[in-house]
Image (tube, helix red, strand yellow):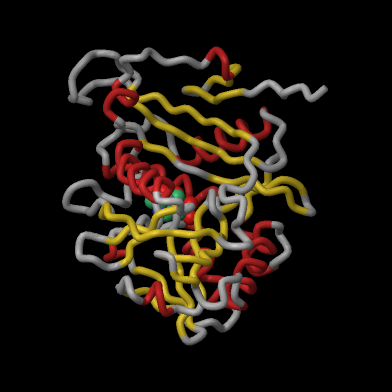
Amino acid sequence: MHIMAASYIWLDGKMMPRERCKVDILTHSLQYGSGIFEGIREYNTDSGPRIFRLRDHVKRFFNSARICSMELNISEREMEDAIIETVKKNKLKECYIRPFAFYNDTSIGLSTAGKKVSIAIAAVPFGNYFKDKEKGISCIVSSWRRINSQILPPQAKSSGHYRNSITASAEAKSLGANEAVLLDTNGYVAEGPGENIFLVKNSALVTPSESSDILVGITRDSIIKLAEAFGIHVEERQVHREELYTCEELFFTGTAAEITTISKIDGRVVGKGVTGPVTRLLSSKFYEAAAGRLGAFTDWLTPVR
Ligand SMILES: Cc1ncc(COP(=O)(O)O)c(C=O)c1O
């Protein structure tokens, strides 16, 4: 019989059994989507469990808080330590880590002034986000546009912003595709609902730039750095929709999606319809780096000790 290990949540400095970690139905961040969050992976390596790019994720968490004027009563260093402690307490060698800061206040009304901010950290077992990440998934270009900085800043990983992602993703699924690709307000390719997108064109790597209202992903940055290290030319620029149809290879990157091949877009087969050589190379280098087997990139890994 498989017995589920007890799960613990770090909540405002205390480790609590998950079943005791409850919030009121009227909690501000539940009602209005005012929380901010991160998604981080822990990988098991030859030298033991390691958290992938912890410092960068914590930095982005604090930037999300700054954009949203949310006061976190903790330092970045303390947050890193709390994340490590949570992973350790849950005795997980590979997991998905979800830090979450939220207005833990039940009074009705939009104002956040003076409202208590709580921080919770969960660590849960997590496999592949897309089961066909290597074989390839099918995508459609969504009829919904990506949020932009004039309305909801894409650089803040705020819960409410994900209504945009959920809507686009649900549309894709309702049309029989695995996932959506969103265009920005100007009609250029932005990203997936929770993933950045890369194209291979004439053997060079192309990805929408920050000006296309993307979340500047940490996996995206890892892939760019790996590409540069292995001699692949990288272009960060505006990408036209039709380039999705004519490129040689197409893939998503993200903490959850890792490297996921897109083999079909808007009913058209991408390239040869299988994972192409550039994607294969970058993907294998990415997992080598995550496994601590790429000497130049071991500083991406934080030991869980
Ligand atoms: C909208 C969006 N874009 C891109 C990404 C990929 O970012 P990262 O690689 O940092 O997980 C995510 C996931 O966090 C996301 O939610």
Quarter placement of the C terminus: top right
Nearest the viewer among 50 and 5 is 5
Q: Is residue 172 left or right of residue 44?
A: left
Examine the rendered structure and indicate whether residue 32 appears above or below residue 42: above
Q: Is residue 275 left or right of residue 112?
A: right
Q: Is residue 187 left or right of residue 169?
A: left
**Occupied quadrant, residue 32:** top left
Residue 143 percent coordinates (x, y): 27, 55
Nearest the viewer among 265 and 147 is 265
**Occupied quadrant, residue 133:** bottom right
Which residue is at a point 34% across and 68% down the rendered structure image? 209
Q: Residue furthest bottom?
A: 202
Residue 217 percent coordinates (x, y): 44, 57
**Occupied quadrant, residue 75:** top left
Quarter placement of the N terminus: top right
Nearest the viewer among 141 and 40 is 141
Is residue 191 at all visible to an observer of this figure? no
Residue 118 percent coordinates (x, y): 40, 24
Which residue is at a point 70% across and 67% down the rendered structure image? 295
Examine the rendered structure and indicate whether residue 236 appears above or below residue 13: below
Residue 194 percent coordinates (x, y): 43, 50
